[in-house]
Amino acid sequence: MQRRNFLKNSSAAAAGLVAAPLAISCTEENRSKMTSQNSGTIRPITICTWNFENATAKAWEVLKEGGSSLDAVQQGAMVEEADVTNQTVGIGGRPDRDGNVSLDACIMDKDGNCGAVLALQHIASPISVARKVMEETPHVMLAGKGAEKFAYEQGFKKTNLLTEKSKQEWLEWKKTSKYEPIINIENHDTIGILAIDQKGDISGACTTSGMGYKYAGRIGDSPIIGAGLFVDNEIGAATATGVGEEVVRTVGSFLIVELMRQGKSPQEACEEGVRRIMAKNKDRTDFQIGFIAINKNGETGGYCIQPGFSYRTYSKEGHEDNPSDSFLKA
Ligand code: SD4
């Protein structure tokens, strides 16, 4: 059954349960506040975590030709999934502590439709499977073996995701089996990508192999709608990279979109998102999280805990890597 039909057939009560918390709409006052913070509307535009030049270039190609923001974010994310040198996404990703590369991804469109795969193995493009979950099933998330079976049914091919480099590093790690995430290096190249298309519609995607040498079955924020990614076509979108457990604890991306709904700029909202996390981690300086956000006007922002995070933007005004300001200073 197609997702749309399934939703139509859902009981009104169940629909109400889901819709109620999201029904707080943007007040006129906040809407004009958001608009006045912007010098003008910048769209189409795409923004992604880290300096993924090829991914934003691909997304921009789609947007420039009049393609949808959904296609743009998927295709941008796929560039990183296919890059064997990126050891935090797709093929070449670091394995879990048992040596299995296990991928998480989610995607969300302008209508609030979303799909996710969790702990998916042997499939090179989890973001594409997440989109199939969104479009071809009545579900939002598929995990593990079920997700893998679904991917094969959809025509995806079984692929070895463990590159020789990642394998050798894992074997080296096994000698001590010490679990020490390294800020900005070991565990942080997840791509979260957001876009607004020519029609002004917003979509987002997030894809990762998660924390290197994680426990088998560990899931972070990246495939969790509201944590690693959230899109509200009326307001904007946000996505995250970094230590997923802390992003989940604050439902970070949803929080940032809601802060924008209340009138904050994307920059202010990202800063508040990081502050909320640090309020729960007062004595911790050993982890990294970066948020990026975009509002309906195409205004962007980003903020992180540790220096070293940046995000890339691409619009008709050009493309650039934007070093992010950080909560902790160098
Ligand atoms: C996770 N947020 O699994 C991801 C990791 C990440 O760059 O962002 N890596 O927790």
Image (cartoon, grey):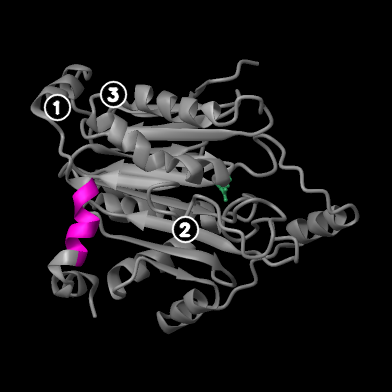
Q: Distance between the residues labelled 1 and 3?
A: 10 Å
Image coords of residue 51 (percent x, y): 52, 35
Indicate which disc residue 31 carries. Answer: 1
In the image, what residue occupies the spot 19% across and 63% down? 15
- Asked if the stretch drawn in magenta spans residue 291, the answer is no
Q: Distance between the residues labelled 2 and 1?
A: 31 Å
**5 vs 317, nearest the viewer:** 5
Indicate which disc residue 92 carries. Answer: none
Q: Residues within 10 Å of mark 2 (few under 14, many from 20)?
A: many
Q: How far apart are marks 3 and 2 (CA)?
A: 28 Å
- The quarter of the picture where the N terminus appears is bottom left
**First in sequence: mark 3 vs mark 2:** 2
Residue type at mark 2?
Ala
Residue bearing the label numbered 3: 264
Q: Is residue 313 above or below residue 34?
A: below
Residue bearing the label numbered 2: 105
Q: In this view, does 18 lie above or below 194?
A: below
- Can the viewer see residue 262? yes
Residue type at mark 1?
Arg
Of marks 2 and 1, the one in the foreground: 1
**First in sequence: mark 1 vs mark 3:** 1
Of marks 3 and 2, the one in the foreground: 3
Residue type at mark 3?
Lys
- Would you say the magenta stretch is mainly helix, strand or loop? helix
Q: Over which residues does the magenta segment extend?
A: 14-21
Image coords of residue 137 (percent x, y): 31, 75
Image coords of residue 179 (percent x, y): 77, 48
- Can the viewer see residue 66? no
Q: In this view, does 61 lie to the left or right of 25?
A: right
Image coords of residue 323 (percent x, y): 51, 23
**First in sequence: mark 2 vs mark 1:** 1
Q: What element carries label 1?
A: helix
